[in-house]
């Protein structure tokens, strides 16, 4: 496929961002019907929702299932650098050629739907979700690990029928779309629970857990609380990863190397193992502890408490809501060892910026407020006001200049450099640093 054709197709795809976010399954169902319902050809699906941690759980599941010998499909969002990252088979991103051809195919049906639906356009996420289902069906994957977008009940991925559903966490986020309180958000996330399909949950606030328990009872779905079913203990953490011990009622997995950093990944590992054990029970499969060990040790998930340089110690993280800021803050406490932090910060306009900044309590010696390369970016001048209210010294800069200045300051002050607030920012910095892990399509 000539490069200019790919560029044209990608531009056509990205233009769909202009139609925003539309909740509801009607458009996705209609589009998939025109495509022959490829999602029905995918018999083994694990569906993952949650405010934070769902992507990490997805890549852990995918890595372990691959080590167990299954051909896996993995659908995640957002991407950091290239849209291909969202759609993988056996850890390999969809090729440019295949992506371009499928964009051309789906576009015809999307245009037809818009004509029939009174000009209601297919959104970016609806389009890409349909494209992914077609690709995974054609690839004849054994198991699909499917991450929701923003919500659950009305999310485009919720047309699928999984064998196990997962809700990793529930916190205040996207209140414009999901509702003004935890109960409303839990109701939306809990919409992925299907009749008779087991639901695995992480540690949820009481108010949210009550909603999920009620939904599970109504759907006659077995509820498994991962923290009660699986024990994960840390032995050691270095900049290269963690050594953890995992045990459940049915298995002792022993000491495992996990390349991902932060204590929050222990909870994600527990969710992963609880869900895998439930999936295996449902399919009458024995999953070897050695496959679990190998899978965890092979996990790669760039942009999540990701050390990209050791001198100065540079960490990028896509945290973009207050709960994630708390998690990042704890990771910085562990990794910085009390050293000050040079912070590069960029967020989208719809985020709870005040709460995000409030939840960063590590000592920040200087903050650079930056604009994201995205139309949803919060103006850096407004971001700077929040930062100054916190009492941090603050500069406004473009991302490349902020990175150079922060690197210089971190070296001079023996500080840690952290860039956070958005996956858009994490991706831009990965591009500037030319991290190979993204373009290689590692799992």
Image (tube, grey):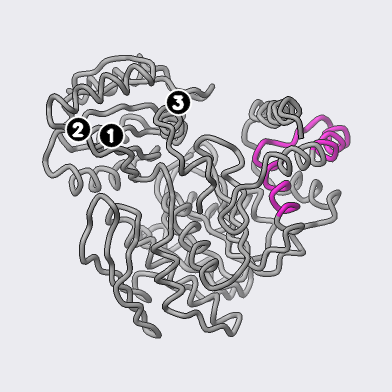
**Vertical side of 398 occupied by 226: above or below:** below
Q: Earlier in the sequence, mark 1 or mark 2?
A: 2
Q: Main secondary structure of the magenta part?
A: helix
Categorize mark 3 by other alpha carbons within 10 Å: few (<14), some (14-19), many (20+). Answer: some
Q: Residue at x 77, y 51 (%)?
A: 29
For the point 61% across and 71% down, the residue is 163
Pick the residue in front: 102 or 201.
Answer: 102
Residue to which mark 3 is pinned: 349
Distance CA(mark 2)–CA(mark 3): 24 Å
Question: At x 57% / y 72%, what residue is drawn?
Answer: 69
Comparing labels 2 and 3, the label whose residue is closer to the camera = 2
Instruction: Say few, some or many: other residues with alpha carbon within 10 Å of mark 2 (under 14 / 14 to 19 / 20 or more).
Output: many
Say which element carries label 2: strand
Q: Quick check: 399 left or right of 133?
A: left
Return the residue nearer the eye: 119 or 128.
128
- Residue 341 bears which disc, if any? 2
Q: Which residues are magenta?
A: 107-135
Residue 348, compared with residue 91, is above or below; it is above
Residue toward you, 350 or 306: 306
* Residue 13 as seen in the image, left or right of residue 434: right
Of callouts 3 and 1, the N-terminal one: 3
x and y percent of residue 74 in the render? 59, 55
Mark 2 or mark 3: name the one nearer the start of the chain: 2
In terms of image quadrants, where is residue 162?
bottom right
Q: In the structure shown, which secondary structural element does the residue marked by tag 3 occupy? A: loop
Disc marking residue 418: 1
């Amino acid at each position: 496929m000539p490069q200019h054709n790919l560029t044209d197709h990608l531009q056509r795809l990205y233009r769909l961002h202009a139609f925003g976010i539309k909740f509801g399954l009607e458009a996705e169902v209609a589009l998939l019907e025109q495509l022959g319902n490829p999602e029905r050809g995918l018999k083994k699906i694990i569906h993952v929702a949650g405010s934070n941690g769902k992507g990490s759980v997805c890549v852990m599941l995918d890595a372990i299932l691959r080590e167990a010998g299954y051909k896996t499909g993995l659908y995640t969002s957002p991407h950091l650098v290239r849209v291909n990252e969202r759609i993988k088979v056996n850890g390999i991103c969809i090729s440019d050629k295949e992506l371009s051809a499928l964009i051309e195919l789906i576009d015809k049906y999307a245009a037809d739907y818009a004509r029939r639906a009174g000009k209601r356009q297919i959104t970016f996420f609806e389009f890409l979700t349909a494209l992914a289902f077609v690709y995974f069906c054609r690839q004849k994957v054994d198991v699909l690990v499917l991450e929701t977008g923003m919500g659950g009940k009305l999310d485009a991925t919720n047309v699928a029928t999984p064998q196990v559903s997962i809700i990793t966490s529930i916190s205040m986020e996207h209140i414009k779309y999901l509702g003004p309180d935890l109960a409303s958000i839990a109701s939306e996330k809990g919409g992925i629970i299907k009749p008779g399909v087991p639901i695995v949950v992480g540690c949820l606030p009481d108010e949210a857990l009550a909603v999920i328990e009620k939904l599970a009872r109504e759907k006659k779905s077995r509820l498994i609380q991962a923290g009660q079913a699986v024990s994960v203990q840390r032995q050691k953490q270095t900049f290269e990863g963690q050594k953890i011990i995992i045990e459940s009622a049915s298995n002792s997995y022993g000491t495992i190397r996990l390349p991902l950093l932060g204590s929050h990944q222990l909870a994600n590992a527990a969710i992963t193992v609880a869900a895998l054990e439930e999936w295996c029970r449902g399919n009458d499969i024995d999953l070897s502890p050695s496959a679990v060990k190998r899978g965890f040790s092979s996990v790669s998930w760039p942009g999540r408490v990701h050390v990209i340089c050791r001198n100065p110690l540079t960490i990028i993280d896509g945290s973009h809501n207050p709960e994630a800021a708390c998690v990042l803050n704890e990771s910085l406490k562990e990794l910085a060892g009390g050293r000050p932090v040079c912070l590069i910060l960029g967020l989208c306009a719809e985020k709870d910026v005040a709460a995000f900044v409030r939840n960063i309590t590590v000592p920040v010696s200087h903050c650079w407020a930056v604009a994201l390369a995205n139309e949803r970016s919060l103006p850096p001048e407004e971001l700077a006001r929040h930062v100054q209210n916190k009492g941090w010294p603050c500069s406004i800069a473009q991302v490349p200049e902020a990175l150079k200045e922060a690197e210089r300051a971190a070296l001079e002050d023996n500080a840690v450099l952290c860039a956070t607030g958005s996956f858009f920012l994490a991706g831009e910095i990965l591009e500037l640093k030319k991290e190979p892990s993204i373009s290689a399509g590692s799992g």
